Amino acid sequence: MSNKNSRALLLLLLTGFVALTGCNKKERLSNESQLPNVVSVEEAQKSFTDYFHKQAQTELQTSNLSIAPNWDAHTTVHLSSKFSLLKVPQIQGGRTFGNNGKCYWYRDIIFQKQNDKVNAVAFEIRMDTAYFNKQIAKLGPGLDIRSYVDNKNFSGYILFFTLDNVFITGRKYTAGKMTYSLFPPAKDKRAAQTEDVICDYNDPVVGIRCWNEETGVTGVDLPGIVVTAPYTGPVILPGSSDPLAPVYNPAYDPNLIHNEGGGTGTSSPTATPPKSPAIIDDSKLKDCMKEVLASLKWQSKGVSSIIQQFAGEGDRLGFNWNVKNGPLGPDENGSTEPLYDRANNTVNTTIDDSKYKNATTFVVARTLLHEAVHAYIVTRFGTNPITANQTYGDLVEYYNRTQDANGAHHMTMATFVSSIADALQGFGELNGIITDRQFYEDMAWGGLTSTQAFKSLPIATQNRINNVLSVEQNGVDMNGAAKQQRGKKSGC
Amino acid sequence: MNVKHLCCGILFLSCITFGTPTKAQEKQRNYTIKKHKKTGTAGALIVIRAFEAGKPDEQPLVGVNLILDADTTKPSRSIGYEGVYKLQVRPGKHKIWAGWPGYKAITTGYISANPGDSILLNFYLSPDGPLVN
């Protein structure tokens, strides 16, 4: 499956969940023809027919799911002003799983249009037996099976399959709230059939990620284990990220889902993307620092691109960076909070202007870049913790070993000193300062001199770097001798 | 001392004697353990969640890293988007470490896991100090 198609599928899955959990029936019945991206029944029919025609031609797996949906019973679900789904009932029934449990289920086909291409997935609802019985007692027998599903109190599974019945992903709901996600086995994410994933309806919590010490197997749990205290509240989701994307395919940046899809939210309040555009709030920063920060925004060399991302340029993070002035400890130039502020989609940094009275703008710039990298990493961990654990595996390993988050950040940062130097050089050139590359590389070590990487440098190199940092910061070298600074005075 | 005072005294002593946590719900400083017994199972199960300290009613944290038998070199595992992690363990005593960049790490004392035990372990992680320089 190509990148583009996979992305479209992810979008469809995300919006599909919203279709059940985020819309009521009145919202579904609106004037379809006046809205963009509405899939007509004719388009859906063609897409469906083409899909199975292509499958048959290539002799790939097909199934009785090629049964034509009940096109007359279609429903259009409007998720936003830009995105709609066409839901078409296909099949339904009761099915026995394991020895005792019987599950009542139905399957709809969901169609969505993106860039004029119609994508489709099978959307299966499996009601918990107890829930189904309760709904029958409440509403009476003999209704269409779909009538027994109520978003407000739904208990059961929402599962997605390709049209040829390969399980993609799913979610478990209890009393109307999502309790966890389901994924295919890790080794072959797309190969599992339904029964391999959801097997035992005696087990109320099938699918919780686990690790078996005996076998060393990690991944989706299968039947036979009873959890005595399953979590039943809303599941925390990382900022605007789609919780399904990182596990489904770690290569995707989940933010793309919302950028392209308009993000109408999911079952969790923390899944809602930030309402305001990404900004750097420097209103409480001293003017001398604002100017440097503005300069850094203007060039994209090295890690300056991080600042641009915070500022909403280019491949933006979509989150905010709050940089303010404030007092810090004796040896602290800048400080960034280690946890992401989910309530405000913000990461907070403090810069102490009193440390820059004798410093050059290079010191301000390198501090801002340094803190921007801290902020970037904090944002990555705060908004997409699972992916960050993988992306920054060395940082996590260092932290696990030392419990020193600051050291772990710096260890990571030391691996791209050269990129920080690029950004400083870009800043210098933008401000008309021409000096040698060695100077920028030495300056880039600012804040990182306690790292093992720095201590591994030859002593003469360490001394040279320490002298450069000291001169630019205070106008004197490590021996206290006054030296000519390369940069302009910061004016702080 | 009249009967009323005697009754109050007995009530007071009862509160002291029976009001302390039981073994089944042993409360530590920054984690809690609840044990449930289930017969017919050879192994033991530890179900782990992590919360931000002082916010036990909020959603459990995702991504928190866990190490079983904290004083060994076993690899870490992380809590997924479900907000809960299940560890099937051999019966015996286990220390569990929980940590994540930005929070102060916690290591439990030895948790005794007997055959058939289901143990719910909640961590309450406190924010770590700021990242400086």
Image (cartoon, rainbow, N blue to C red):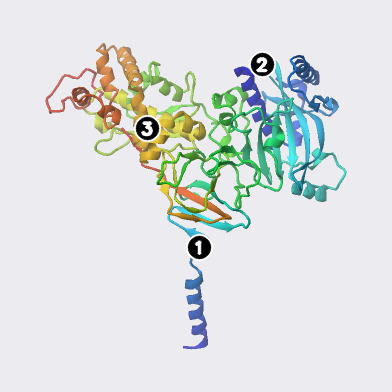
Whether labels 2 and 3 belong to a single chain: the reply is yes
Left/right placement of residue A5 relative to residue B79 reads: right
Amino acid type assigned to the residue bearing label 1 in the image: Lys
Q: Which mark is residue B23?
A: 1
**Which residue is nearer to you in this view: A61 or B115?**
B115
The residue carrying pointer 1 sits among few (fewer than 14), some (14 to 19) or many (20 or more) residues within 10 Å by Cα, namely few
- Nearer to us of marks 2 and 3 is 3
User: Residue A167, how many percent across, how many down?
Assistant: 69, 30
C-alpha span from label 1 to label 2? 61 Å
Figure check: A126 above or below A292? below
The residue carrying pointer 3 sits among few (fewer than 14), some (14 to 19) or many (20 or more) residues within 10 Å by Cα, namely many
Figure check: A244 above or below A3? below
**Chain letter for the residue marked with disc 3 in the picture:** A
C-alpha span from label 2 to label 3? 40 Å
Figure check: A98 above or below A468? below
Q: Secondary structure at mark 1?
A: loop
In the picture of the structure, the residue carrying the numbered disc 2 is A115
Left/right placement of residue B86 relative to residue A483 reads: right
Identified at 24% across, 19% down, the residue is A488
**Chain letter for the residue marked with disc 2 in the picture:** A
**Chain letter for the residue marked with disc 1 in the picture:** B
User: Residue A51, how many percent across, how many down?
Assistant: 75, 18
In the picture of the structure, the residue carrying the numbered disc 3 is A409
Amino acid type assigned to the residue bearing label 3 in the image: His
